[in-house]
Image (cartoon, grey):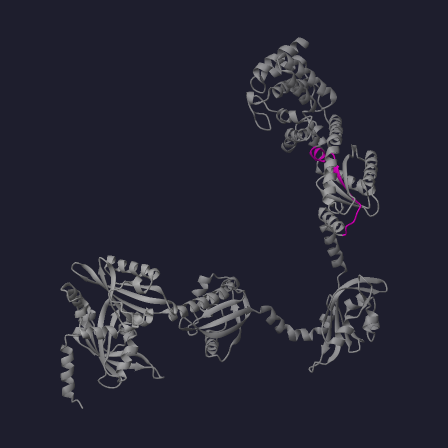
Amino acid sequence: MTSPMDNDLLQDLFRRLPLPFALHEMIYLPDGRPHDYRFIWVNQAFLDALGLKESPEGKTLREAFPEVLKDSFDWVAFFSSAAAGYGVRKALVFSENLKRPFNVISFSPRPGTFAAIFQDVSDELNRIRLLEESGERIKAISLEFETVFEGIQEGAFLVEVSEEGFKYLMVNQNYRVITGIGDLDVRGLKASQFLGEAASHEIEENYRLCISRKETLNFKEKLVTGEGIRVLSTVLIPVANGEGAPHILGFIKDVTEQERAQEERDEALSRYRAMFNDHSAVMLLIEPKSGRIVDANPAAANFYGYSVDELRSMKVQDINILPQEEVERRRLKALSGRQRYFLFPHRLRSGEVRMVDVYSAPVDVMREKLLFSIIFDVTDRERIRKQLEEEKELFKTTLMSIGDGVVTTDQSGIITSANPEACRLSNRSQGSLLDANFSDAFPLLDPKTGDVRDPLGAALKTGRTLHISELLLRVPGNELHVSGSASPIKDQLGEVMGGVVVLRDITHEKKWRDRMLFMSYHDSLTRLPNRRFLEEQMAQLEEEQSFPVAVMMADVNGLKMTNDAFGHERGDALLVAAARLLKGACRRGDVVGRWGGDEFVLLLPGATPDGARIAAERIAEAASKARLGDLEISIALGWGAKVDPSQRLHQALKEAEEMMYRHKLTEGREQRRRILDQILASLGARSHEDEGHRNRLRRLCINIGSTGGLNWEALEDLERLCLYHDLGMIAVPARTLLKPGGLGEPEWLDVRRHTEVGYRIAQNIPELAGVADLILLHHERHDGSGYPRGLKGLQIPVQCRIFALADSYDAMTQPRPYRTSVSPREALKEIESQRGLLFDPDLTDLFIRVVSQEI
């Protein structure tokens, strides 16, 4: 037994020891497993070796050197074997934290304690280098170093760097086990000679990187062995002298299982994160002691009205309006597992309070105990629950005033109660309903087949609720469509003791649905079937292999021109009239529908090509007699037919379309001419734009144009401009055209718009398309004050410049409703005053000279 004096002497000796020395006390978990160790005392050499200014005495390893725990070497496990009295323990350890290798010797002076001597073996490795230079090389390495090298817990290897490459000098047994090379003598071999060409390329690349950087490398690499692909944690240490880095000391550790476990943890975490973020339920992770919200999913942000980051900066007490003490008490209950379900009032960002079901359970996340809570908004449910007692008291009142018919019966189907709506549906008084059989009082029929239905009887028999989607309730004086349900009423033992039937009058709803269905298959303007309906009918005829079937296409001639000239209201009326005409000219069973725009399609089942031609003749004859006011109705027709199964209806439709377009070329021209004549006649009746005005303009303009040297094509365009320049006036209200006195701003806007309307009309008439631009620009003026584009000078076509002079002259010399006319000479004098302003100066001189000769 050592005396106190001996202890002091030994302690003094170890304190003076030039090697780093420390005495420790091992710390165990309750189950006896080593957990940590505490420094009892250390010598000065220990402090100097680690560069410490303050002694770690009294501290644990985790407190004094937390970063050392990141080393691949398990210090606690190694020292625990010494503390357990297993004799002297030795190990050569490379500390990633200190970037140096140490030879560690540990022994236990008494149970539960251990002493450790740390020897920096960097000099020993340098000695190896010196031995190599002197010719002794690796064979001179001491037996002690070889023993220590072999005792390293990781796979250790020493590589010589030479001009010939990287040659292995020695490897320990752990290296052989990890790489699977067995007892192979690797001395003087390269990596490619025993690890394979593929692996050696990456290995030697890392060696070169270690030498070039002259620093320790830490990395992970993969190696293919007989047991499969292994993941290695590798440390490379360059052992340098003054002339370079002739050796590399390396350590490898098989971390395949750790990597696989980490991948599984990462995958599980990824699945959890995806579930957490993508789930529609509100989810929170809560630190149980403080109530801090650690994480929240997007559904929580959407529910509470805060961003996820804002929720992470809050505590659960910020949203739970119960007293803080109560919230904490229940939170700790959830942490202990004593209670998993809670009902809480939670306040949203808007200030609204919602009742929520909270299901909480403790979970371990990154070694931290948290509460995982799934939250459901049950405000409506709680409100209903709260109202339940009141509803029980008010049941009769509610029953009597509810909008649906409610009838209760006994188990035989005899009515025991009925509310006013049920009386209305049955067209009977409440007194006459009581004690009546439900099936007699409410005869329900299938609306399609007329078969009798008894949903209450089925519910009483099966004990299950039956939903009534739609039945016909036919009682004296009433025929209604109803929906609802029939349910059994059961006692506490589950025995059927009666039934309740809820009936809702859906007559108006059905009419609305039928109307919506009608509208989805019919054109809203003409009320004819639409293209969707026609295509489905054609598909059905194809599927049924029906033939012969004729297809006719009809196009209303002049619709666009009618829209431009008389307005879309008149155009719509033309379409409706055409639809009515087509429908009236067809047989029963024929289908007439609007294909789109101004086109209609007629399906004529059983009709051959001759039958289609006869139908077209009927339509043409009806159209020749029909009128829309003062407009004739003109319809271009084409037809085709499917006369055998090999033909397709779409081919017949294409033939009908091609024929229709051929007819439209001729018939459309005639219709456009008729509409044009109607426009001119209408203008003459509602303004000064009569035939006399047009003829005067034509005479003046042709005279000026021919004198001015215009060619015949320009003169022809000028003549058509005179005749049709004011086509667009058809869109100006008659009250504006005939208004005495000046026009207001809105009225002027209507008048100025007539050039654009006339332009659009002319564009749709091939005969006038060439002068559409002239019609658009005939109110432009030389100084740019005209409209619609404000063109100046020679930007204005010469025909429009001539027309401007003639139109102004005729306007001044002819009487108007709002002013008297002036003499020709006064008109010429006024025109001359606008020379170079409103009118082209050269054409003004020509106009005055020519007209002066005529008066």
> Residue 399's quadrant in the figure?
bottom right
Residue lying at 71% horizontally and 21% vertically, measured from the top left: 694
Q: What number of labels is visible?
A: 0
Left or right position of 615 against 60: right
Residue 233 seen in the figure: yes
Q: Which residues are magenta?
A: 544-564
Q: Position of residue 243 (x, y in %)?
A: 16, 58
Q: Quadrant of the C terminus?
A: top right
> Residue 343's quadrant in the figure?
bottom right
Q: Is residue 462 above or below residue 644?
A: below
Specify whether residue 550 is painted magenta. yes
Left or right position of 386 against 560: left
Q: Position of residue 714 (x, y in %)?
A: 63, 18
Q: Is residue 256 above or below residue 200?
A: below
Q: Quadrant of the N terminus?
A: bottom left
Q: Position of residue 718 (x, y in %)?
A: 65, 20
Specify whether residue 321 is painted magenta. no
